[in-house]
Image (cartoon, helix red, strand yellow):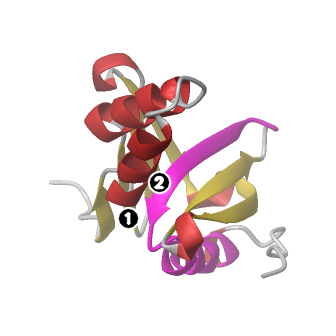
Amino acid sequence: MGIREEIYYEGGPHVGDLILNLLIGLTVVGLPLAVGAIVRALWLRYRITDRRVTVTGGWRGRDRTDVIYSEIVKIVKVPRGIGLWGDMVLTLRNGSRLEMRAVPNFRETYDYINERVIAKNPLYTGAAK
């Protein structure tokens, strides 16, 4: 039996992202945004634990990315939907980036991830809040 992970958040993107983009999708210009929001709502899932961040997405949820906190060197957050949800980009030690769109309670989630990155990666200085 392996070490149990304590789950902080497990679920999909914020429902407000879907609602807002469906309203924008009523215009022809907003149709791609609405389609993107529907795809995210159907197949994008986040799992944030005390050991790693897992993002499952792609067509029919077939792509999975796991990132341990010691690999993260930078975190950028951007509020969306009048601050009810937000986007985050985790930059990894090898230079690749993991985008997390429409994260619910993104400020608290950012703080949670940031605390773990500081504890696991002594070279990480933290992003300005």
At horizontal 48% and vertical 73% (from top left) the residue drawn is 84
Please provide the residue range marked out in magenta: 95-118
User: Residue 78 at what x, y percent from top left?
Assistant: 69, 63
Q: Secondary structure at mark 1?
A: strand
At horizontal 54% and vertical 64% (from top left) the residue drawn is 81
Badge number at residue 53: 2
Which of the two residues, 104 or 57, is positioned nearer the viewer here? Answer: 104
User: Residue 105 at what x, y percent from top left?
Assistant: 45, 74
Examine the rendered structure and indicate whether residue 28 appears above or below residue 30.
above
Which of the two residues, 33 or 125, is positioned nearer the viewer here? Answer: 33
Screen quadrant of the N terminus = bottom left
Q: Are marks 1 and 2 in contact (CB under 8 Å)?
A: yes
Q: Secondary structure at mark 2?
A: strand
Screen quadrant of the C terminus = bottom right
Left/right placement of residue 115 relative to residue 21 reads right
Left/right placement of residue 54 relative to residue 1 reads right
* Residue 60 seen in the figure: yes
Q: Quadrant of residue 41?
A: top left
User: Residue 10 at what x, y percent from top left?
Assistant: 28, 59
At horizontal 54% and vertical 53% (from top left) the residue drawn is 68
Examine the rendered structure and indicate whether residue 9 appears above or below residue 71.
below
Which of the two residues, 49 or 100, is positioned nearer the viewer here? Answer: 100
Which of the two residues, 30 or 85, is positioned nearer the viewer here? Answer: 30
Badge number at residue 49: 1
User: Residue 115 at what x, y percent from top left?
Assistant: 60, 80
